Image (spheres, rainbow, N blue to C red):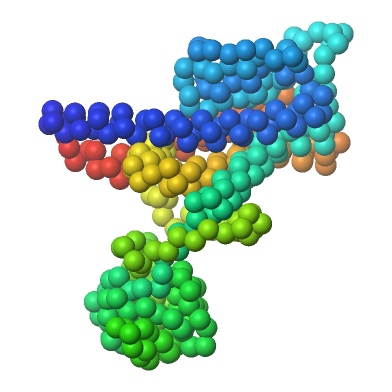
Amino acid sequence: MDIQLLSQYASNAFLYTIPFLFVLTVVVFFHELGHFLVARYNKVDIESFSVGFGRELFGFVDNKNTRWKFCWIPLGGYVKFIDDEDPTSSINNSVDKSEDINGFHGKSLLARSSIVAAGPIANFILAIILFSFLYTFIGKPTVLPIVESIKEYSAADVAGFNVGDKIVRINDKDIHNFSDIPNIVAVNSGVELTFTIHRKNQEIILFATPGNLESKNMPENTTGIGVLGISGGLSQGNVEIKKYPIHKSFVMGISDTYNIIKVTLNYVGGIIIGKESADQLGGPIRIAQISGQVASMGFSPLISLTALLSVSIGLINLFPVPMLDGGHLFFYAIEAIRKKPLSEKIQGIFFRIGLGFVIFLMIYATWNDLIQLNIFDSF
């Protein structure tokens, strides 16, 4: 491998590390804080609150005798209850039942479920708060409906669109930002649409019939989704930043959080049924790379990325996979139906399966990251 290229990779890794750790630490801290606060509300004794794994760097003990610690491997974290065997919240049978403790495992099914669910919910709340903060104090960037590029031989090219055209109306619907355009075009494949265009201080009318979007996995097939063949962009003058009142920002934050969840679930569902490719799954390397790139763009994009990852991590944790919060909730649902929990042996088997799945997913995502970075082409 070229020494200069190796040096470049090492330099990039260093530049990406700090933003990555900032984003991950914030997201993990709020996730664990959700577990912690609801556990405290349910009067559960908490042994430790850890940000990171491994040896403790520094920490303190609060007035409830909980050890708050920050460890030297900042790639996760956990809340450990007084009757936990380990950070995965498996029960510690060696705890003296006669001791005056308020353990997690002795609480009601509703209390345990609420404590477990509080972590992902905290991630969603964090995202809403971050989005609201951005839209109120910094502003929300809106890509204006200005054509920045046109695909050759596309519906837009045939209809006579020019770069710089501003689309102000499609049929009888006013267009305020670029995202309004695909929302209309996508559901009108093969249907002629009337476009009102502002071009060099003149208003003109163009007629275009959206074509069909080709399937990514099977290019010979079409999806039935309409496509015009234009794209917007972030060129100077094509983006408008607007601040909103706090109540509107809050509603917009909820909407953005919901949309991220919806898009993620649609993508995961598409992978399961074979409509989407899993090669877009990213791991820590890609997150670090994106974090570094976004950080170079300024504080606002980094906060947006933190909100996005907070939603993603909260949602992933709700998947019914043992080892994750969703796995615990799945077991609690079975317990509610059976009126008794599964045996520790059965739960242990499922947790091992879940651990294997999580490790496989991490390896696969990391492999995708390395391929996306073209790192193997350098050898």
Where the C terminus falls, by quadrant?
Answer: top left
Relative to 105, 237 lies left or right: left
Residue 249 at x, y = what percent?
A: 60, 56
Residue 172 at x, y = what percent?
A: 52, 88
Q: Which residue is depicted at the point 82% across and 24% down?
A: 43
Residue 12 at x, y = what percent?
A: 27, 34
**In the image, residue 221 above or below residue 296:** below
User: Residue 1 lies in what quarter of the image?
Assistant: top left
Residue 55 appears in view: yes
Relative to 224, 237 lies left or right: left
Relative to 26, 334 lies left or right: right
Relative to 8, 184 lies left or right: right
Q: Which residue is depicted at the point 66% across and 17% down?
A: 48
**In the image, residue 34 above or below residue 100:** below
Q: Which residue is depicted at the point 76% across and 37% down?
A: 114
Q: Nearer the viewer, residue 302 or 331?
A: 302
Residue 195 at x, y = what percent?
A: 41, 86
Q: Nearer the viewer, residue 331 or 70?
A: 70
Q: Which residue is depicted at the point 53% across and 50% down?
A: 137
User: Residue 145 lies in what quarter of the image?
Assistant: bottom left
**In the image, residue 130 above or below residue 100:** below
User: Residue 41 lies in what quarter of the image?
Assistant: top right
**In the image, residue 220 above or below residue 245:** below
